[in-house]
Amino acid sequence: MIWVFVFIPMAPIVNNLSIVLLFIFISFLPSSLSTILKYPAIINLGDSNSDTGNLISAGIESVNPPYGQTYFNLPSGRYCDGRLIVDFLLDAMDMPFLNPYLDSLGLPNFKKGCNFAAAGSTILPANPTSVSPFSFDLQISQFIRFKTRSLELLSKTGRRYEKYLPPLDYYSKGLYMIDIGQNDIAGAFYSKSLDQVLASIPSILETFEAGLKRLYVEGGRNFWIHNTGPLGCLAQNIAKFGTDPTKLDEFGCVSSHNQAAKLFNLQLHALSNKFQAQFPDSNVTYVDIFSIKSNLIANYSRFGFENPLMACCGVGGAPLNYDTRITCGQTKVIDGISVTAKACNDSSEYINWDGIHYTEAANNFVSSQILTGKYSDPPFSDQMPFFLSLKF
Ligand SMILES: *[C@@H]1O[C@H](CO)[C@@H](O)[C@H](O)[C@H]1NC(C)=O
Ligand SMILES: *[C@@H]1O[C@H](CO)[C@@H](O)[C@H](O)[C@H]1NC(C)=O
Ligand SMILES: *[C@@H]1O[C@H](CO)[C@@H](O)[C@H](O)[C@H]1NC(C)=O
């Protein structure tokens, strides 16, 4: 499942014993990561960064090809050409892809977890203009319903559902992965000034904190909280808010959006530490996605990418290949001409997939960086004897 790079100083004389030891070493390696990140189940909450099919299953939106073309060969319900960060992370933990809670087809098996993330979701309650009604609080209510109903089924029907539903202890031993907040910040810029956006962050995080506590009350103890990425580097935001070049930073990203993302992250980090201190029997890990994605965008060519900001799937060509009037996979008449937003020839050269979401290639990079453990607080690299990398 996992490719491992091993750095072992070469002895001047390689004798038979050291070769035998090396083999014993290597045969233990693939399990080392899944030993450190060992959870019987994963509960995921969030937005499109980790939605594996909820918004689509709810019938609120549909995605067409070329979504999914790189890995699933058809639209999978993910806003990506292939796999998301959550898919790569679960793979590294030797866990199957997470079934979306709302997907009633495809014989979903929820024994090892369930995904409540839905694209467009916010921490703050949804309003009539929201893309997704499934705000953080509603996702938690869905989770509580899931838990109550699962335990009810397990107790009433004996062994029949054991293969499909998590037993009670999985809720305390499982990992709660959360990646949400991007839409609260990005959405706020449509009606607020930068100062107003910055001033709204504490109340967004109060709602987040209340949600975390609800999960704790339900038995959740292991939390993995992803911070939000450099929103100002998304083609959608550059197209809308970056037409004046003085609004852009040295990488071509909208400065105000990244400033808001940074402040949100600073306060989210403080909240993670506070929560950990308040509930010492929990394990809260804060994961710095912002730094990983910023590094990828700033140093893209070093990591094998050709385009840091331009969308792979869109219309209009360079510099952004993004038009607010048409989304990836759509065909529309624009300025009197019928156009289709098609994918680029090689999505692995691009960081951005559709102007809003990252490509599978970028998600793979981000996941491999997360798994170094260096971007987490507390870091888990200390516990990992080797540098681990994901398969490509
Ligand atoms: C969570 O933290 C407790 C200490 O509070 C520790 O005993 C336990 O091993 C941790 N669990 C995981 C899964 O890391
Ligand atoms: C780009 O790489 C350089 C050299 O490793 C590093 O110092 C810098 O912080 C990186 N840029 C970002 C935005 O992470
Ligand atoms: C894709 O490749 C074809 C053939 O090599 C080329 O004609 C076309 O311009 C390329 N399209 C894009 C969007 O790069």
Image (cartoon, grey):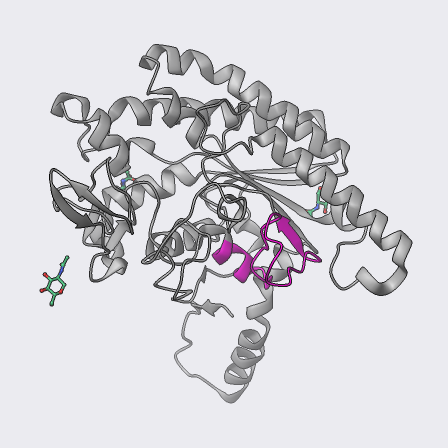
Q: Answer above or below: position of 20 versus 93.
A: below
Q: Quadrant of residue 326?
A: top left
Foreground residue among 263 and 161: 161
The answer to if 95 sits in the magenta stretch is: yes
- Magenta range is 87-114
| Residue at x 40% of width, y 63% of height | 74
Q: Answer above or below: position of 84 versus 326.
A: below
Q: Answer above or below: position of 182 versus 331.
A: above
| Residue at x 80% of width, y 53% of height | 167
| Ligand 1: quadrant of the figure | top right
The answer to if 91 sits in the magenta stretch is: yes
Q: Is residue 127 visible?
A: yes
Tell me which secondary structure the magenta stretch mostly adopts: loop
Foreground residue among 22 and 287: 287
Asked whether, in this view, residue 376 is left or right of residue 339, the answer is right
Asked whether, in this view, residue 289 is left or right of residue 212, the answer is left
Q: Quadrant of residue 290?
A: top left
Looking at the picture, how far across and down is residue 221, in whole percent? 71, 39
Q: Answer above or below: position of 162 versus 269.
A: below
Asked whether, in this view, residue 270 is left or right of residue 142, the answer is left
Looking at the picture, how far across and down is residue 85, in whole percent? 45, 51
Looking at the picture, how far across and down is residue 242, in whole percent? 19, 27
Numbered label tally: 0
For the C terminus, give its image quadrant.
bottom left
Foreground residue among 373 and 139: 139
Residue extending furthest toward the bottom: 16
Looking at the picture, how far across and down is residue 51, in whole percent? 50, 46
Q: Is residue 221 visible?
A: no
